[in-house]
Image (cartoon, rainbow, N blue to C red):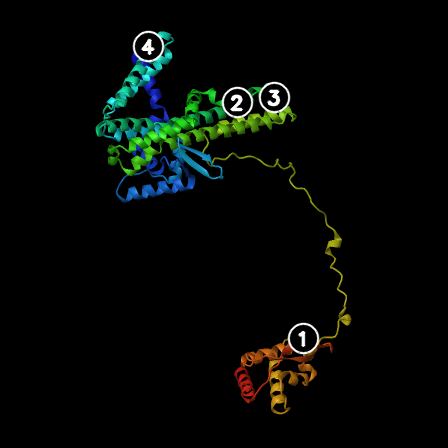
Amino acid sequence: MSDIEGELARVRGAFDKPTLRLLDRKWAPFVLAVFKSSFSRDQQSIQADRLHAQVDTYMDELRAVGVDVPGFGGRALCLQWMNDQWLYRATAENGEEQYSLTSHALEAKSLVDSMSKDRALISESRLATILSTVRKWATEANPDREVRIRRLEEEIAEKTSERERLNAGGEIVAASDDRMIDGYANLIDLIAQLPSDFKRVEESVEAMHRRIISDFREEERPIGEVLDEYLAKTDTLMSGTAEGRAFGGAFTLLRDDALMLDLKNDLEAILEHPFAAGLTPGEQREFRGTVLVLSQGLDRVLNRRRRANATLREHIENHDVVKDRELEKLLRQIGKGLATWMQTAGPRSAVPVKLMPDPPAVKHLRERFYDPKSDTPPPPLDDVSGDAPAPLSLADIRKQGGPLLDDMRQAVLDAFTVGGAVTVGGAFNHLEEGLRRPVEILGLLDMAREIGVLDQITDTESFQAIRPDDTRRTFTVPRITLNEDDTASLVDLKDRTS
């Protein structure tokens, strides 16, 4: 194979990756604009239905200003982007499905951001970073003891000379705005790569998880041997991939609280320089949030690894070793086929499965035969009307009802105008038995309230009530007296209610 053929094959392989496929599509500007508008450092995951609605809203806004947009809905576009490996959908701890950008989408977004900024990447800060990094790793790679000692002595002499100059009162010259802007641009370019780096590690852990589960389904060796091997794999899950090994090397630095505190203080010191006045509040917030980006990325990777370990252990340890081997083999084949089918199946694809066996090959099967007894009518009901109790009279029913207000009002008026009654209780105690029920006392008190004679009562008296079953009961009731004005009010009350 010639050099050009090899280069062509490598370039084609690069264009087949999701990152360049995203940038090479017709709707690439629209897709990246949606990603940049929806996701950010503070919003790395979005609930699925919410993102569908946001995409629909973005398309409506663009159509309103005459911009050409895809002809699909938000949900269909998100599913398509997920199949293109630009979006990742997972179930959160609260049970809701959420979307997040994949490492490919983050790389494409970072590339577009870098190309849209009007600045030169070749600068003193960038070259100094490269030289310093090369020198550091060259020292680490060189096993020559004398070379290492010489370089350390050079660094010590340089630092000692600078310290003596400062101790002697030497001038401290602050960096110029142009120099600080150059260094800030270099740092921003490096920091922008962090989200995609962390996401790549997450995806690597997830891919390792799926590969182990797939291998376990296809395993034909004894169960005990399988368990030992795969439990060992879960313990070394992070060292099984290049991304995981790289992350493991950075893990110690990311977990150093003192180092993270120094980084935070250094970021604040940079923002205190006068050049930071030219930065927008959003740029200052993102620069200050570098420590948060590191800690959140570390936590996401560790959570993904912890979930993968828990899933693998539960899947392996709960495997029933005593179940029938033939059934176990069949279930493995079904699981393997399902995993293969899910790689190309859509979200609502279905496979027809018979839940019940086919019916027997019998045209007609009689379920019951004729029974003459079923045509016999039920026996007639017995006539028990002679045992029914005597019906209640109207008078008996009225005894069990509420107060007889009209009869009681007239009886009280007669008692005060003709009978010479002094109090309502005295009048009540001389009424006929039908009007001396306990419930009639409530009717009397209600009428007294309506004519306003209950407000000035300070004494009580006894009411001798007679129940419908002729038993007697004494009630202590406020002592009510009626004068001529009160009886007139009682007459007026009767006229209003009649």
Taking 9 as reference, is 342 left or right?
right
Q: Position of residue 387 (x, y in %)?
A: 78, 70
Q: CA distance from mark 4 to mark 1?
A: 117 Å
Q: Position of residue 67 (x, y in %)?
A: 27, 40
Q: Quadrant of residue 373?
A: bottom right
Q: CA distance from mark 4 to mark 3?
A: 58 Å
Above or below residue 76? Residue 1 is: above
Of the image marks 4 and 3, the number of the one nearer the N terminus? 4
Q: Position of residue 421 (x, y in %)?
A: 63, 88
Q: CA distance from mark 1 to mark 2?
A: 84 Å
Q: Are marks 2 and 3 in contact (CB under 8 Å)?
A: no
Residue behind mark 4: 150
Residue behind mark 3: 223
Q: Are marks 1 and 2 in contact (CB under 8 Å)?
A: no
Residue behind mark 2: 235
Question: What amino acid type should be assigned to the residue bearing mark 3?
Answer: Ile
* Of the two numbered discs 1 and 2 in the rendering, the one whose residue sits closer to the viewer: 2
Q: Secondary structure at mark 4?
A: helix
Name the foreground residue: 351 vs 181.
Answer: 181
